[in-house]
Amino acid sequence: VQLQAFGGGLVQAGGSLKLSCTAAGKIFRIDGMGWYRQAPGKEGEFVAALTNAGSTNYADSVKGRFTISRGNAKNTVHLQMNSLRSDDTAVYYCNADRPVYEENDNPVAVRELWGRGTQVTVSS
């Protein structure tokens, strides 16, 4: 099972980007998916999360600017980022919460899975 995140890039301040993340593999269940980010020289921080029930949660710094949503494909989540600022520059990581998946013909349950990051750079 892998999480694949894409959609990062270089954008001017005030612009928009849309990130996407897909969990690939034989997955039985994921309780939720979300995004975290890590800026250079800083600790990682929570950005947004979406539960299976449809509840969303956002960091205060992105409320009103970012929107997390479920994709049409199964186990896919998007992060629409508008009004980007220079302090949004970071590597963005996708996270799957409490996934249950098949590995070597056996069910596996873990606390969380992480994908490789995608770089978002906002120029001022």
Image (tube, rainbow, N blue to C red):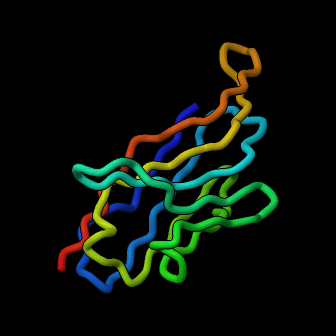
Q: Position of residue 88 (x, y in %)?
A: 33, 68
Q: Where is residue 5 in the image (x, y as percent from the top left)?
A: 45, 50
Q: Quadrant of the N terminus?
A: top right
Towards the viewer: 95 or 21 = 95
Q: Where is residue 97 in the image (x, y as percent from the top left)?
A: 66, 42
Q: In the visual, does 84 lie left or right of 103?
A: left
Towards the viewer: 42 or 48 = 42
Residue, x 71% and y 29% (percent of image)?
Answer: 101
Q: Position of residue 32 (x, y in %)?
A: 69, 50
Q: Which residue lies furthest to the right in this view?
A: 53
Towards the viewer: 43 or 111 = 43
In this view, 114 is above or below 53: above
Towards the viewer: 13 or 26 = 13
In this view, 25 is above or below 66: above
Q: In which quarter of the image is residue 50?
A: bottom right
Q: Quadrant of residue 16?
A: bottom left
In this view, 53 is above or below 12: above
Task: Report the number of discs.
Answer: 0
Q: Quadrant of the C terminus?
A: bottom left
Q: In the visual, does 85 lie left or right of 33?
A: left
Residue, x 34% and y 61% (percent of image)?
Answer: 8
Residue, x 69% and y 36% (percent of image)?
Answer: 99
